[in-house]
Amino acid sequence: MSLTKEKKCDVTILLPCHNEEMALPTVIKSIFQVMENVSYSYELVVVDDKSTDRSAFIAENLGCRVLRRSVQAGAGAARKTGIAAAYGEIIVMLDADGSYSPVDIPKMLDFFPEYDQVNGARTREKGSYYLLRYPAKWVIRKIASCLAGHKIPDLNTGLKAFKRETMLQYVWTIPDGFSCVSSMTLAFLCNGHAVKYIPTEYHKRIGKSKFHPIKDTYLYIITVLRLITYFNPLRVYLPVAMILLFGGVIKSLYDFFFVLGRLQMADIIIIITGVIVALQGLLADLIVAQTRRNASQNYYERSKSA
């Protein structure tokens, strides 16, 4: 079906954009070409994060609905603006820099409504700072997979499709910067939503990268830990508590039997710290459980009154 002008449609294709005038015409035309023969009604929305070039003008001339942000805040802020204003029941996101191929969009849509989120797992890395990014991303992805309890082929892919209604529950978890897409993935995985991955090609971006290797990697790590703590705190607290308790017991036995014949103050402090961390984890888990219970009850009451 063709591009819709209605206030409601099946799919919103969302392009967050900041100074992408070089890539935008190619990306937009490719999306229109791919969507020519699909059976879904759709809209193409470009969220302009206060670009200083002709990005917004180009998008409008090519037939997109353009949302202009008055303050530049980052890719996550642009995505949140687009999610809030989308008309589609399903939102498809990809970067406006030409790094992802729109040809995968129809394949992703085929997995709805069975899945709540479908992601493109990149088969190769073509981003800038490859030698810095790839090892860091691999380590963080493995940590996130362990903490979330799910295998994650690609944690920070920018090619995503998801149910808008489901994502609206977790918009508050999305940071303004580059780690926004990781938050979207973890929010769904940690709350029991069905998430699917399909392989996708990844290309060298058109134009200059806005990724900061140190700052954005640091924020990436913090975001992963924060999201897991939000939704499954025991996955963070219990390993730390077990390491402290186990280490404290081993050190106490060693000091008592092989060194001093008695315990040291440090032994007791380590063990007590382990107990405190474990109790904090249990308390955080109870708070999360109660929050989920209240949210479920509120959703049930709204559904009854609707």
Image: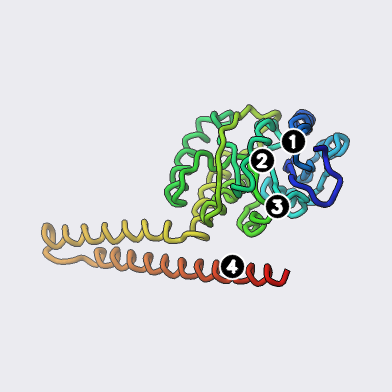
Q: Can you give x and y, in whole percent of width and height, for residue 263 in the image?
A: 18, 66
Label 2 vs 4, first from the N-terminus: 2
- The answer to whether any part of residue 47 appears in the image is yes
Which-is-in-front pick, marks 1 and 3? 1
Label 4 vs 3, first from the N-terminus: 3
Label 1 vs 4, first from the N-terminus: 1
How crowded is the residue under tag 2: few (<14 C-alpha within 10 Å), some, or many (20+)?
Answer: many
Which-is-in-front pick, marks 4 and 3? 4
Q: Amino acid at mark 3?
A: Lys
Residue at the (35%, 61%) spot, across then down: 241
Q: Is residue 297 left or right of residue 272?
A: right
Q: Amino acid at mark 2?
A: Leu
Q: Spatial distance from mark 3 to mark 2, Cα to Cα?
A: 21 Å
Could you tell me if the residues under marks 1 and 2 are in contact, i.e. CB atoms within 8 Å? yes
Residue at the (59%, 32%) spot, across then down: 200
Q: Which residue is mark 2?
A: 109
Q: Which residue is mark 3?
A: 80
